[in-house]
Image (tube, rainbow, N blue to C red):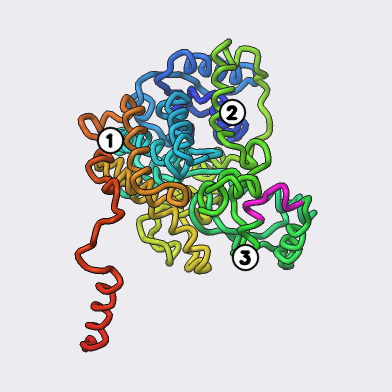
Amino acid sequence: MSKKIAMIGAGSVVFCKTLLNDILATPSLMDSEIVLMDLAEPKLRSMEQFAKRMVKDNDLKAKIRATLDRREAIKDADFVVIMIQVGGVEAFEHDYKIPLKYGVDQCIGDSLGPGGAFRGLRTIPVLLEIAADMEELAKPGSIMLQYANPMAANCLALGKESTVSFTGLCHGVQTTLDLIAGYCGVPKEEISYLCGGINHMDWFLKLEHHGRDLYPKFKELFEKAEYYKNEKVRGEVMRHFGYFMTESTGHLSEYLPWFRKNQKALDTYCDEPSFGGESGAYYNWCKTIAEKYAEHDPLEFESTHIDRRSVEYCSYIMEAVTTGTPFRFMGNVRNDGYITNLPNGCCVEVPTFADDNGLHPSKIGDLPSQCAAACMSNVNSQILVAEAAIESDPEKIVHAVAMDPLAGAVLTLSEIRQMCSEMLEAERKWLPAFEGKAVAPKDLISIPPDCKGVDAPLDPALAIGHRFGELIEKPTE
């Protein structure tokens, strides 16, 4: 049967073009009705014309239309693909430049840290509106395929507030498998692996080739300069934690406290260009693309030839649901006991199967304790971001950023509060739910300017000594 596919945020020219190609290259989806939706009409019309040319030039039966009305796009949809970026590059500039002024140096800035937190505040309310539209208007059993970052916080909020069937999709596992296969000199398709964790901190728990453990060889290679140089942060984490992760050095350097907290750390681990650790790499790339596309229609002279499908999971999931042929992928889902030493209700990334009965996540059990601990340092902040967005609570913005490993390694609590206040004021037009609300100003809770020469009411050491003495003299029964 023909499927209706709603693509929300279709003005995302590069990514929408990739997913359109994948869908139209899939035999069971070639006759689908594809509805493109965006609020940026010029980009939307450009994508609409390009998609129609793809269909015509490749002699396909798919139907293409575009709308500015999200509810119209979602009505009777089988699949709703999310690729929104609320605030675009303008908001992203604040996400990157304001924290940098305070000393928080982000390479990517879209998933965790102050940049990821504020992207979540902008995105989560819109995602929840889309989910509500799906509950009301989409076909029963419809599936949301969610690509918007910050992936984990967004999906955590969806799992908390909505009953819609969804999965968050990322290509970290696929691209990391390319790296592992290249390093070890074995075909990617022949690698047997098991991953578990959270988005952008998913651990390769098993790596085998025809029953042979690949980890000894892989770890040995990372002790060679030419291999280590390519992925310094991931290599260093594997050396100390024992397992390799699914996200690039540029991403991972932001999620842990050890790699970007001072100039020495940056010079040691983040000195490669672009996503190898460079400051503002993703913001600069987005800005360059936006400026390039502002000059002319970005798709006017693009080839409409349909290529082989990309590594993105989207079309393969749709194909599995449509045909009933199972497809295994790594999905970001609500943790309902799938990883047992991470909190229920958080977002985890686990092996998931799609078929004509929907989505079926797999249980991993416990992660190695050191891996779970690293994930928890991110989960704590993700929970607070979701709560801040759902409750429109400025104080929880401060809490979320304070619990971020990188911001916490660089700034004091007062500095974090001041930075969050500045970011909230700069981004108010994309945060309507915070109207009339502000982060409490720093001077209301500041440290007294000079504590020197002031006598404390009781010597701190003596106070501690008294307390310990009480415990020794009066043990708890």
Q: Could you say which is closer to the camera, residue 40 or residue 378?
A: 378
- Measuring 50% from the left and 69% from the top, which residue is drawn there? 369
Quadrant hosting residue 164: top left
Over which residues does the magenta segment extend? Answer: 227-235
The Cα–Cα distance between marks 2 and 3, rounded to whole angstroms, is 33 Å
Which numbered circle lies on residue 285?
2
Residue 22 horizontal/vertical position (percent): 60, 33
- Measuring 59% from the left and 48% from the top, which residue is drawn there? 247
Which numbered circle lies on residue 446?
none
Using residue 68 as the reference point, say whether residue 252 is left or right of it.
right
Residue 346 horizontal/vertical position (percent): 38, 54
Which numbered circle lies on residue 136?
1
Mark 2 residue type: Trp
Which numbered circle lies on residue 242?
3
Of the numbered discs 2 and 1, the one sitting upstream in the chain is 1
Badge 3: few (under 14), some or many (20 or more) residues near its Cα, within 10 Å?
Answer: some
Using residue 155 as the reference point, say whether residue 442 is left or right of it.
left
Of the numbered discs 1 and 3, the one sitting upstream in the chain is 1
| The furthest residue to the top | 296
Q: Could you say which is closer to the camera, residue 93 or residue 177?
A: 93
Mark 1 residue type: Glu
The Cα–Cα distance between marks 2 and 1, rounded to whole angstroms, is 38 Å
Q: Which mark lies nearer to you, 1 or 3? A: 3
* Visible residue check, residue 5: no
